[in-house]
Amino acid sequence: MRTISLVEGQGSRHRLDQAELAAVRAMQFVEIGLTSETGIYELQPAKNKVGALSSSGVQVLIHPKVAVSRLFWLMDFAEQDVPWANAKLGLEEASDLTSAIGHSFLEEATRSVEQIIRGYVPSEDTSQVLRGRLSISRQIKRHMGMPIPMEIEYDDFVANVTENRILLAAAVRCARMPSLSTRDRMVCRALIRRLESSGVRPSRPGEMWRATRLNQHYRMSLRLADMILKSESFAFESGGVRATGFIIDMWSVFEDFVVKWLRCYMDPRRVSMSSQHALAMDTDLQFKPRADLYLSTPGGGVFVDAKYKSIGQGQPPISDVYQVHSYCIAARSKVAHLVYVGSESSGFYALNNSNVTVHRHSIDLSADTAVLNAQLERIAGLIAEGLGVECSSGTHPATSLSDHRAAGQSNPV
């Protein structure tokens, strides 16, 4: 299989024969541009997308601009109950992001199910003997009051609990990762067989797990499963050519990171935080946008909007300023913050005739630990100052960042 490596947000030229061109054309998330040279094409990955695509003997890997280890940290920021520093994530063994996630999940999940969790799950059955409780309503509805057979309800001690269902759903999706190694595919199939033979069924969309004492040894595998299930996995056919893919939206990853980061710094007793905050822009409720984050106290509130893009040495796009300005007008707020990716210094804009101030910040995701921590703390301090509060003295993200091994490595691509 031919492998074509691309970097997030960057186009590059590649020679393709007609069969390879048809394979790439069948993939989503890759644009093909013509060049002046015959057989040479400009391949441009879709904006803010990273992952792996595969079709008819051609594999396209879209690498993130930041190190894979740093991206892991971003995707599970501030989860203090997971010992990332001690995890054998296999980041050094994987050549791309999806391989790293898939390999890490399969290794952790296989270890987890060695001590498979079981729990009591409500069950219903029709039986000749009484077990558990008799369901009077179902008995009357189905058997018109006849005593046998009996409609019973009972709690069954089984492995088909939420934690195992999530692992199985992630394993099924993991099996469709184009860049997964042969060994990892064998491990994946074994994991699926292990769970299915225990009576586990895949989780439903939106099914959530919560940390308990009983699932402590599942924590790492469940966090990695969450990463996989939040990604976009697809398989389709276009023009007679089948394509598969596993894609992560970096815009969504960065937005989640900003929300988690600020939650670490803000005291929940003094600051209320609402992510994807719904707004009413007009009296008839025809326009109802959602702001990335709204932080409020009894004295007022501020908006924070995450933008996974760099503004270079220029000013932020006027559309971004319009956006947060409209949020402030609708909510009668006076302050908004735009958070970009990059190393530029902060700034602010006092807007005419509205008493609204828009602050601009940048976070350098490729910076080393000390620099990145200083950036996060400074920006959080400015946001807290606008709310009239101090940063929380509780758990800060510095702990999770410092503990994450290889977080400051540069992208090997």
Image (cartoon, rainbow, N blue to C red):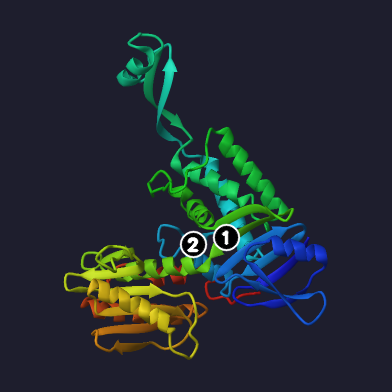
Residue count near mark 2 (Cα–Cα under 10 Å), binned few <14, some 14–19, many ≥20: some
Q: Which one is nearer the viewer's eye here, 123 or 22?
A: 22
Question: Residue 7 lies in what quarter of the image?
Answer: bottom right
| Mark 1: secondary structure | loop
Work out whether mark 2 precedes mark 1 in sequence or the reverse, and give the earlier one.
2
In percent of width and height, residue 378 lies at 35, 82
- Residue drawn at x 53%, y 70% is 70
- The quadrant in which residue 15 appears is bottom right
* Frontmost residue, 258 versus 34: 34
Q: Check disc 1 and give the amino acid type.
A: Leu
146 relative to 46 in the view: left or right: left
Find disc 2 in the rendering and name its residue: 84
Spot the residue most to the left. Answer: 298
Question: In the rendered image of this protein, does residue 140 appear above or below residue 98?
Answer: above
Q: Is residue 90 visible?
A: no
- Give the left or right position of residue 172, taking residue 342 as reference: right
User: Left or right: where does residue 12 sit relative to residue 199?
Assistant: right
Residue that carries the numbered disc 1 in the rendered image: 89
398 vs 61, nearest the viewer: 61
User: What is the distance, in whole Å, between disc 2 and disc 1 at their CAs?
Assistant: 8 Å
Residue 277 is situated, as x and y percent measured from the top left of the image, at 32, 64
Amino acid bearing label 2: Trp
Circle on res. 317? none
Dot 1, how many residues are within 10 Å of its Cα: few (below 14), some (14-19), or many (20+)?
A: many
Task: Say whether marks 2 and 1 touch (CB < 8 Å).
Answer: yes
x then y, percent, for residue 376 = 39, 77
- Image quadrant occupied by the N terminus: bottom right
Q: Is residue 140 above or below residue 374?
A: above
Q: Position of residue 412 (x, y in %)?
A: 64, 74
Secondary structure beneath dot 2 equals helix
